Image (spheres, rainbow, N blue to C red):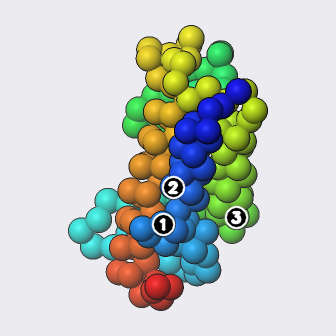
């Protein structure tokens, strides 16, 4: 059973994961991105919106899988973490990636909010990682790439500040 202090920590981790504290939440950042700019790579940058979105999805899935799966299989960096193509093949691929980002986030949050949540005990299948570390890693990683998506949207003329 989580202590009152652990419950507070979990509450703040969930808020950080969802965003909107010090930056726009991911659902706002990923909202209403026109199909015609999803695969555009602006001059001087190595990636498109699609590459960023798909990278978030893949990395988040990997962190979720690692955090709950004793049979976790490590993926190959960087090949398995970045899409090769600049644009989704179909709008359905874009929609799927966006939906998975939010459903996998909900599943990760469910791990944190589970009655038997243990933030500190290292996973037996890892090398010292625990749920707290993975939650902070996920929040940090998503925030980093969310910022890159905002920059890309600004460069492509499809960002309207919500703040």
Answer with left or right where residue 45 lies relative to residue 13: left
Kindly identify the residue that appears in the image at 50 percent across and 85 percent down. 162
Q: Which mark is residue 95?
A: 3
The answer to whether residue 101 shows anywhere in this view is: yes
Answer with left or right where residue 117 lies relative to residue 139: right
Answer with left or right where residue 132 lies relative to residue 67: left
Badge 3: residue crowd in 10 Å (few <14, some 14–19, many ≥20) = few
| Residue 159, x across and y down, in percent | 46, 84
Q: Are marks 1 and 2 in contact (CB under 8 Å)?
A: yes
Kindly identify the residue that appears in the image at 24 percent across and 68 percent down. 44
Tell which residue pokes out farthest to the top in this image.
124
Q: Callout 2: helix, strand or loop?
A: helix
Kindly identify the residue that appears in the image at 48 percent across and 49 percent down. 139
**Residue under circle 2?**
16
| N-terminal-most mark, 3 or 1 | 1
Q: Are marks 3 and 2 in contact (CB under 8 Å)?
A: no
Q: Is residue 106 above or below residue 161?
A: above
Q: Are marks 3 and 1 in contact (CB under 8 Å)?
A: no
| Residue 48, x across and y down, in percent | 43, 65
Quarter of the image where one finds residue 6:
top right
Q: Callout 3: helix, strand or loop?
A: helix
């Amino acid at each position: 059973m989580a202590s009152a202090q652990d419950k507070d920590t979990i509450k703040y981790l969930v808020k950080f994961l969802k965003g909107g504290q010090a930056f726009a939440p991911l659902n706002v950042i990923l909202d209403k991105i026109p199909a015609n700019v999803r695969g555009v790579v602006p001059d001087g940058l190595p990636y498109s919106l699609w590459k960023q979105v798909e990278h978030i999805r893949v990395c988040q899935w990997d962190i979720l899988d690692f955090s709950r799966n004793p049979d976790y299989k490590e993926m190959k960096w960087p090949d398995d973490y970045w899409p090769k193509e600049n644009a989704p093949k179909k709008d359905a691929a874009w929609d799927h990636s966006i939906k998975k980002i939010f459903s996998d986030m909900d599943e990760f949050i469910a791990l944190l909010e589970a009655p038997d949540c243990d933030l500190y005990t290292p996973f037996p299948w890892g090398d010292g990682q625990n749920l707290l570390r993975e939650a902070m890693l996920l929040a940090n990683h998503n925030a980093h790439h969310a910022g890159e998506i905002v920059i890309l949207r600004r460069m492509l003329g499809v960002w309207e500040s919500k703040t």
